[in-house]
Amino acid sequence: MRLHEQRRSILNTNECCPLINRCKRTLLPTTAVPVKRTRLPGGPLSLLLLLSGLQRPTQSSEVAIKIDFDLAPGSFDDQYQGCSKQVMEKLNQGDYFTKDLEAHKNYFGVWQKAHLTWRNQEHAFPTTLTTPHAVALLVYTLNGYVRSDLSKAMASDAKTPQQYEHSFHFKYLHYYLTTAIQLLRKDITTENDTLCYEVHHETKDVHFEAYLGATIRFGQFLSTSLLKEEAQKFGDQTVFTIVTCLGASVQDFSLKKEVLIPPYELFKVVNMSYHPRGNWLQLRSAGNLSTYNCQLLKVDFFLPTHAHSNSSAILCSWPQRKNETKHNTKTHESVALCFSRPEGL
């Protein structure tokens, strides 16, 4: 549900995703197998790793977990404030994307598929959104394994500058997802106009607990649904009703009516109810909080790209989409990696 100057409008739930030309409602994996409850110690790392695991496709679950909310202080939450252009230039001039591809099995194929999907679509999108941003959104929204791996990396692989430099292999995706959300919001809002969405999210076999009035963060990119009935379909879960004022609608890139919430958005717990077969938490946007900013520019090294016979990829301009006009092509002049298969993948 979109909240705009105290006016509400329900989006057409029969509208299909333009990029894939079919409708489908998807939720987190569920199971009818009886479960038992166990206690998981609280803490930012356990919370983030738990949330990331819930976004990976699974066959079944045997344990219902209780966990407390907090501010997820260990999350990599860079907003790239005041340095977005410089970070983009550094990403495109270095070999960061190549290293990201090499660090993940089948990662190349995911990006290639998303890129081809984007090139073949005919739907008009905001001119503020470049091709790399659009492809990054497709990679994230259409692949549960990427969502899970990114969330785990944000929770544990960027706690120090050295760890971020050598172990965080989602520099490219994190930047383009973060700035895609910002660009999508910028396209439909003005300086004095706040756009918020009422969305829903459910976690199967997990009971989140918080106290009324608490301020929390998810600390990761969170996929949420505009469809309340879908989020409340199953028992033994925690259902969130969330008013986000920093999230962006990505339903043109997804199989569902989806709003993507950034990791740095703060929420206040304004209502709750606890039941043996499921909890409900109502959250309202309360600003933003970031520990990191412009982290890539603080890295002590810079690796220029040199074309050679065994290089994993080379830098090139994104190919023009088949429906792009000459004017729109200029909008998508961002430099990115050609999808020539990296060696060993």
Image (cartoon, helix red, strand yellow):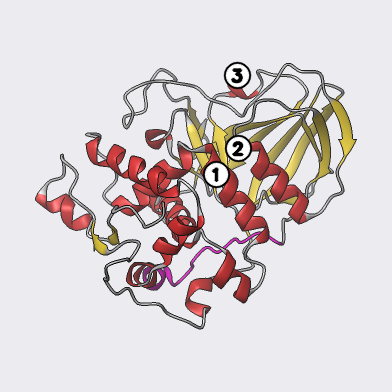
Tell me if residue 84 is in the magenta stretch. yes
Measure how far apart labels 2 and 3 are at the Cα level.
22 Å
Q: Magenta stretch: dominant SS?
A: loop
Q: Amino acid at mark 1?
A: Arg
The front one of 180 and 166 is 166
Q: Is residue 166 visible?
A: yes
- Judged from the image, the secondary structure of the residue bearing numbered disc 1 is helix
Locate residue 43, reporting x and y percent.
Answer: 81, 54
Vertically, is 155 above or below 53?
A: below
Q: CA distance from mark 3 to mark 1?
A: 23 Å
Q: Residues within 10 Å of mark 1 (few under 14, many from 20)?
A: many
Q: Is residue 200 left or right of residue 92?
A: right
Q: Is-magenta flag for residue 247?
A: no
Q: Nearer the viewer, mark 3 or mark 1?
A: 1
Distance Cα–Cα, label 1 vs label 2: 7 Å
Query: Which residue matches tag 3?
Result: 229
Counting from the top left corner in percent of width and height, residue 192 is at 45, 54
> What are the residue bounds of the magenta stretch?
74-87
Precedes in sequence: disc 2 or disc 3: 2
Looking at the rendered structure, the kind of residue marked 2 is: Arg
Circle 1 is placed at which residue position?
147
Report whether 122 appears left or right of 327.
right
**Residue 56 circle label:** 2
Disc 3 on helix, strand or loop? helix
